Every structure is written in structure tokens, then in C-alpha cells.
Amino acid sequence: MKNEELIFVTGATGFLGSQLVHELLDRHPQATLALLIRDRSNQSAQQRADLIVSPADRKRIQVYSGDVGLPNCGLDACARQYLSSETTRVIHCAATVRFDHSLEEARRINVEGTQRILDFAATAPQLRSLAYVGTAYVAGERTGPVLESELILGQSYRNTYEQTKAEAEALVRSHLGSIPGVILRPSIIVGDSQTGATSSFKMMYWPLKIYSRRLWRTIPGFPDAVLDIVPVDYVANAVALLAFDEAALGSTVHLCAGPRGSATIQQIAQRASEYFHVPEPRYVDPKFFFAALRPLLYLSLWGRKRKVLRDGRAYRDYFSMRMQFDTTNAERLLAPSGLRPPPVLEYLNSLFDYCVASEWGRKTVSPQ
């Protein structure tokens, strides 16, 4: 019997993508997943897929060696023809999330890669939906409320990641008249809300680690800066639902904690201070810190503290954000399922517990 759905997924081995694969398999038992995965020098695409899919589910998985950064996504003619004719859904998660890529390299993956997926979707006669996973931080350096309907309003960007994700989203928007699609914008994705489990210790985890180890106490930012984080289980659930929701087509959806669920830097720092038994941080105006204080510190500090100064540059702007993501579309579309993001402060200790148990990713933690 022919399966009802063939879901073409990019970015399946990433932090969000691997969780999404499990959600799709659980929610849609009649579906087959076609995963586009890059070969690595020491690991084939199939081997990488086997790491995220249980033996019992492998019969429902088709693995294709490829890369959105290559012409035709690196697919041979036979594979592309088959996928084009049989695919019913596309979920595009693949992206570079590095902040230090050159604009050219970030565009090659995030913008040109998205264009290739749009080209593929345009040739799929059975396509029912394309879900594009972007980021809420296409808002760049804006302040105040950010609506789901807004994209490029003359804002500047903190890094090439934000800029190229905005350019990629603009491409997707330009095709929504001809391709049935939905744009999904998560904020900062962290570990599971119940277990705290994560495979990615970037973003908020790095400054949290150096703070918990008493390597650094000064925050170049504002105590009332807003940190919007969402747990990976909520985002994966939401993507798996909205990729199949006809009511979502044509919409842009913030998968964010939003005004009711986000927290300030001070609230998170206070909780971390209590949990890790360290003094509360000091806050310094970021303009003063980076213009005057940091250059002096860089000359006077050595070893681990100098490394903290150097590595922390990528995160500096995220301690001074004063914007809130509107979640009107998310609330409307997800209300029937009862899915909503838990407030950040409700599961923060679970994240801390996992950081400690895993020694910040150095040790494997067995599921409870």
C-alpha cells in the first residue's frame, strides 16, 4: 500500500532537525521521510541518519546524500526526479547558524540553499505544503514589538546569520503565491523543557557556563534586556503540526516565548546565581564596555579570562536586546492542539540540571 505522505526534510541531523524527525515519525505513522543529509569525511549520510533514527523506524526513512549548498542540492537526476514526483511536504531546516561566516559563505548556504529548495518545491506536482524554518532574529537590531507580518524595515543586523536568514525569508515570501508555504520563526532554541536535554551548547549556554564557573561576572548589557528562548520539544511539536495545517498556509508564525513567557537577563541571572551559588552579575553599559573597558582588559588579562573576552564577542549584542516577538498567529494556529511554549522561568532549572549532569556536553547522559 502506498504511503500517504512523503516528507522531504533538510537539516535532519541538526539539533532541531533530529527532534523534528522523531515528532514526524510519531505523529504521522503512514508517512515516509526523505532526509537530505551531507556526507562527512568519516561518515556517510546513511551512517549519520542511523544515529538519529531507531532501527525500528529505519524502514520509514529514505536517506539521500546531498547538500543545499550544491546545485540541485547534490542530488543525481534519478533521485531528484523521484523526489520531485512523490514529495507531498517539504520542511526546510538546513542552515548555517554560525555568526562568523563571511557574508558570501552564509549566503551560499542560507539564501542560495533556500532558493534551491524553492526551485525543487515548484517542480513537485503533489506538494501540499512547504514549511520554511527561519528565525525570529530576522528582526536584527530592532527594538520594541516585532510583528509576525513584518520582515525588512530598514533594520541593521548583528551578524551574517541574521542578515542572510532575512534575505532567505524574503525569497520564501516572494514564492508564497505559487507555492503553498508557511514561514516559522523560532527564537533561541534551548534544551527539552522536561529533561533539559540538548546536543547544542551554544547561545545562552556559553555565557552561562563561564558565569557558573566564576570565570566572568560582568555583563556588558542591561538587566531589563529581553531573552526570548523556547525549548526544542515545543518548536519540534509546532513545526510538525503547522507543516500539516492548511490554515497556516501563507502565514508567518513566531515560535517564541513572546511577551508573556520570555524573561529578562536579570531574572535568568538571578536564577543562575541561586542555582550555581555564585554572586549576582554586575551590569555595564555595553557601549562603554566595548569602546573603553574591553580594550584595557584585553591588554591586562591573560589565559582563560582573555579567552573569555575573545570568545564572548559573538554574544555581546544579545545582552542588550529590547524587543518582544508578537505571537498572535502562533496562538491562533496552535490553540486547537493546546500547544503553547512554557514560560522560560518554569523550566530553567531543568536546563541547568542537564548542563551539570552532562558536564556542559562533555559527558553522555542516559535518558531517565
Image: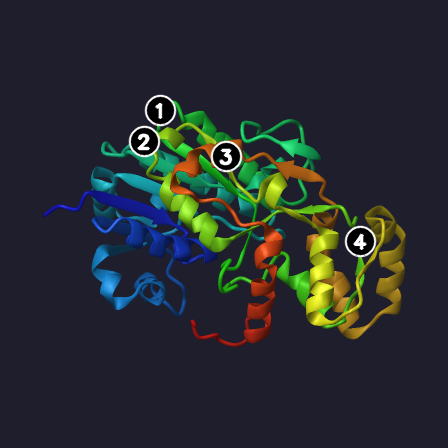
Q: Where in the figure is residue 132, as x and y percent of width and height?
A: 43, 39
When the figure is inspected, residue 221 is found, relative to residue 141, above or below; the finding is below
Residue beneath the point at 74% across and 67% down: 307
Instruction: Determine which residue is flagged by label 3.
Output: 169
Residue type for callout 2: Ala
Instruction: Estimate the spatial distance between the alpha carbons at disc 2 and disc 3, rounded to whole Å.
Output: 16 Å
What SS does tag 2 mark? helix
The label nearer to you, 1 versus 4, is 4
As drawn, which residue projects farthest toward the top? 177
Asked whether residue 68 is in view, the answer is no
Location of residue 142 by image quarter: top right
Q: Are marks 2 and 1 in contact (CB under 8 Å)?
A: yes
Number of other residues with Cα within 10 Å of mark 4, as a class: few under 14, some 14 to 19, many 20 or more: many
Instruction: Estimate the spatial distance between the alpha carbons at disc 4 and disc 2, rounded to whole Å.
Output: 46 Å
Instruction: Determine which residue is flagged by label 1.
Output: 178
Instruction: Determine which residue is flagged by label 2.
Output: 122
What SS does tag 1 mark? loop
The disc, 2 or 1, on the residue closer to the chain's N-terminal end is 2
